[in-house]
Each structure stands twice: as structure tokens, then as C-alpha cells.
Image (cartoon, helix red, strand yellow):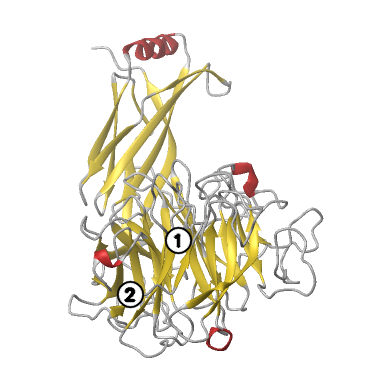
Amino acid sequence: MKYLVTLGVMVAAVLLPGAATAATLVPIAPDLTWGSEPIFVTAPSGDQRLFIVERGNESTTPDTPGVIRVAEGNTVKATPFLTVDNTDTFSERGLLSMAFSPDYATSGLFYVFHVANGPDALDPDGVAGDIRIIEYRRSASDPDVADPASARIVFKTGHSAGNHNGGWLAFGPDDMLYFTIGDNATSSNAQGLGNFFGKVLRIDPTDPDGPAPGPLTATIPADNPFVSTPGALGEVYTRGLRNPFRASFAPDGDLVIGDVGEGTIEEVNAGNLAGRNMGWPSCEGFCDTPNPAFTDPVFEYPHDPGGCAVLGGYVIRDPELAGLLGRYLYGDLCRNDLRTLNLDVPGADPGQAGIELTPAQGQLRSFGEDSRGCSYVITNKSVFRVAPNVGSGKDCPRAELPPDPPPPDPLPDVTYTFFAPNSRPLARQLTFAGQCSLSCTIRVGVTVRISRNRFRPQVGRIKLTPVTVSADAGIRTRVTLKVPGRSLKRMRKATRNGSRLNAIVRSKLSGSDGSSGSGQRGVLLIPAKRR
């Protein structure tokens, strides 16, 4: 659902963001525990340990090992579970995530999403930037250590850009392995079915009998949506994404993707996304013109104020987090506040989580969950359990996964109103007003169209410099755009010649909780009466 703000004096559009709830972050270990930047956490089904993925240190020499560590109880074990050498950490590359096979308890198999720095014994033909899904097996003698000699490449593709790697990996409710790859910094890749970029991919990582063609030493599920499409790669599950850095599966099995936008909009996609086209690069967020070929996100938010890249999270399952239970927790790379969505209602009911990262806690990087339904926040400095209060322990207090959470209660309504008259005198300044029920920013842009009369097309256009102002909650706030002297002279001359001036006023009201409203209206500019 795309939010619209009504332009007018009497009517306000009602949106559904809302109030914060109580929660806090408890570090699972001191900052100095980590050898490099934590980037992902997860756990095998039924296992009370927590596994932390470290991306690897950025340095002048990008080949630095990625590391996976194990936390059990209140302790992070000193010996790494696995060290992944030949890891390229240039730009956004690195060891980015891991996933445990559904039968890990018996098979010991798990998988990592790894960006290689070049050839190695595992792949003598490799080059820097190669994205690899690698299968490993835990050690037969020590369950807290993996066997590095068991490595087998399940999937590989070249990837020339340092950014837009994607980087998420997980088994779905169907026991298939899903992973994401960004568009390789070339937006047109996202639409093509003949490449792996800008996609969610789905495979069965089981090693097939006989040699496998191309980059895959796994099985393509027969029910993948493009298996029978000529020219399409069978691994493709969802396309039209820019950089789906983080995703997850909701308790109901829906795939939820935080897709990083470009210059203005971030989006969250959710649902049964098999075969869906999410629209990039034709659309960033909701399409300006609806297109039945594209699937709209469940939620979008603007970069202004302060956002730059969505970091997708998880639906909260922890019953101790009563105010967050059943809501999707997510954040933004450039914001300190964490936010939530109700994925089960139109518009996603956006709201604050009541958690704000401090400089000492670091900059947000990712989210995670364990096998017992506890949630985690990962920064560039540490890993934190999302807990109900500061007295909560860092270890998850349950022995098993809780029942599926009930649908969350809706949050209080938020209203946005933008005030614009039907007509106003032509003057050196054009003034409008906006009001939000929470603190917000109001951005207004105006384009003046000059037409001979109302029935004939425009003969000229003047665009005024947009203005953005901050507004306190509940305060009607003025927004004034200046008309340059040369433009004002031109418009006055046009009215004397009988032309019509129609100002197209576009407004964007962005709440402090990440919600927003936008709208457009024509305002007739008429000559000012002479005194």
C-alpha cells in the first residue's frame, strides 16, 4: 500500500505507524571478543548454541580470513568453529552468512556465503570477487569445530562489483537452500533471467550424481518457477531486486526481503515470492505507474530523514518481548533507531521498536535469531540479544522454540495533513503548510506550467527549488518557496498575455518513525490585485 497525504484544508490522510515499546540490547560478549566485524548470527534447529559469522577485516590486503565463532551459555568459545581463508573483504565483500542443514544434528552439514579473493585449492580457476556457496561438515571429534577439509563448492558465480553482493543464505520451510545476490552494480541485470544478479536463488544443495554443468554442483528443484522457461537459469526464484543484503522467513513461511534502494526509497518485500518480479530498475519501491508485471513491496520508506540502506531483520518470536511479539524488526545502515512492521496488515503498520543504538554500541549491520526464538542485533562492534530489560541475561532463557506468535495488535494511528488552497495570488513567495501528529519533515516542490488557456497544452514550465522543513508533532508548519525575480517577471508577463499558470505542488511528509505520506495537487496562480 502506498501512503497518500491529502492536500486540502479539512481532510487528513490516516496512516498506521505508531508508538514505541520497551526493549533493550544486552551484549553477548565484550567488544574485544571479535577479531573482525560481526555480520550474521544463526543456530541449528534444536541446538542451544549461537553461531556468529565475522566478515573478515578490511585492510590494504583484502585477503583476510572470515571466521565463525560459537557462543554457548554465557561464553564465546576461544577456538573458532571455522576459519575461511581466501576471503575478499574489498568494499562490501566478505564472509557474509551461513545456514545449517535441516538435518544438521545427524549430517553435520552447513553452508557459508563467501566472496573469494582469487584461486585456491578449492577452486584453482577462481578470481577475486567470486561468490561461492561452500558446504562444510562439522568435525567428527568435536561438535564445536568444523572440518575445513570437508569443503565443497555448491555454487559459484563471478561478481565484478565490490558492492551489491547480496549475502543472505538460509534454508526455507521446504528444506531448500535460498540465497540472495545483488545486481552486480548493473541495474539491468535484475530483470534478465539468464544471469544470477538481482535475484533470490533456490537450490537443493545435495550433490547430484555425475558431473554438474556450469557453476552448480547441486540440484535445481523441479518446482522452481523458471525451470522450463527458455533461456532462464533454473536456480532463479525471484528477480527484480537491487541488493537484497538481508532476508528471512516469517513464522508463516513467507519470505521477507529488505532490498537496498538507490537514491530515494528503501523497501521491504514479503509473501510467496516464487516467480515474482519486484520491479527494479523500473521501480524503486512502489511503481509510480502501477504495472501488473511487478509485485509491489509491502512497505517503503524515504531516505529523508537520515536513511540510506534498509537492513532486513526477523519477525519477533520471543514472548518476553510483548510489545514487539509478531512484528518484523528491521533497521537502516544510516539510522540509529530500530523499527518494526506488522506484515499481516495493509501498509505494514510501521512503528518504532523503542531501541536506539548508541555510538558505543556501534553501527547497525544485521539481525539474527537462534533456534529458541530469541532475536539479535549485530553492529560493527558487537552482537546483542534483544531483551525485555537491562537485567535480562545475554543467553536465551528457553530450551526450545516457542509457539508461533499471534498477530500483533495495531499501533496507534498517525495523521499527516498538507494544506494547499485551490488558488493563490502570484507573488515572490509561495507559502503552504503541513502538520503531522508526530515529529516529521515536510518537503515541497512546485512546478509551474504556463498554458495559453485551460484547453490548450502548456507552452512553458518553471521549476522552483524544493524546500524541506522540520515540524514538531501537532504543530502546523509553514513551507515557503521563493520565486526568483526572473521567473516571477516571466510569469507576470504570461498572465498579462492571457496565459494560465497552474502550479503542480508535490508534498512528501516523512515521520520520525519511518512512515511517510505524499501527494500532488494543482494550485491556480492568479495575478495579484494592484493597490
Asked whether residue 420 appears in the rendered view, the answer is: no
- The mark found on residue 324 in the picture is none
**Which residue occupies the foreground of this view, 332 or 385?**
385
Looking at the picture, does residue 269 appear above or below residue 129?
Answer: below
Q: Classify mark 1: helix, strand or loop.
A: loop
Residue at the far bottom: name it: 399
In the rendered image, residue 108, in percent from the top left (x then y), is placed at: 55, 83
**Which residue occupies the foreground of this view, 98 or 143?**
143
Marked residue nearer the N-terminal end (2 or 1): 2
- Distance from disc 2 to disc 1, alpha carbons, whole Å, reads 45 Å
Which residue corresponds to the image point at 32% horizontal and 12% vertical from the top-left? 485
Looking at the picture, does residue 221 appear above or below residue 119?
Answer: below
> Based on the displayed image, in which of its 4 quarters is residue 524 positioned?
top left
In the rendered image, residue 354, in percent from the top left (x then y), is placed at: 25, 65
Left or right relative to 215: residue 400: left
Q: Classify mark 2: helix, strand or loop.
A: loop
Q: Which residue is mark 2?
A: 78
The disc labelled 1 sits on which kind of residue? Gly
Q: Which residue is mark 1?
A: 347
Asked whether residue 454 appears in the rendered view, the answer is: yes
Q: Which quadrant of the figure contains the C terminus?
A: top left
Looking at the picture, does residue 224 appear above or below residue 191?
Answer: below
> Based on the displayed image, in which of its 4 quarters is residue 487 positioned?
top left
* Total marks placed: 2
Near mark 1 (Cα within 10 A), the count class, few <14, some 14-19 or many ≥20, is many
Which residue corresponds to the image point at 41% horizontal and 78% vertical from the top-left? 370
Looking at the picture, does residue 312 appear above or below residue 479?
Answer: below
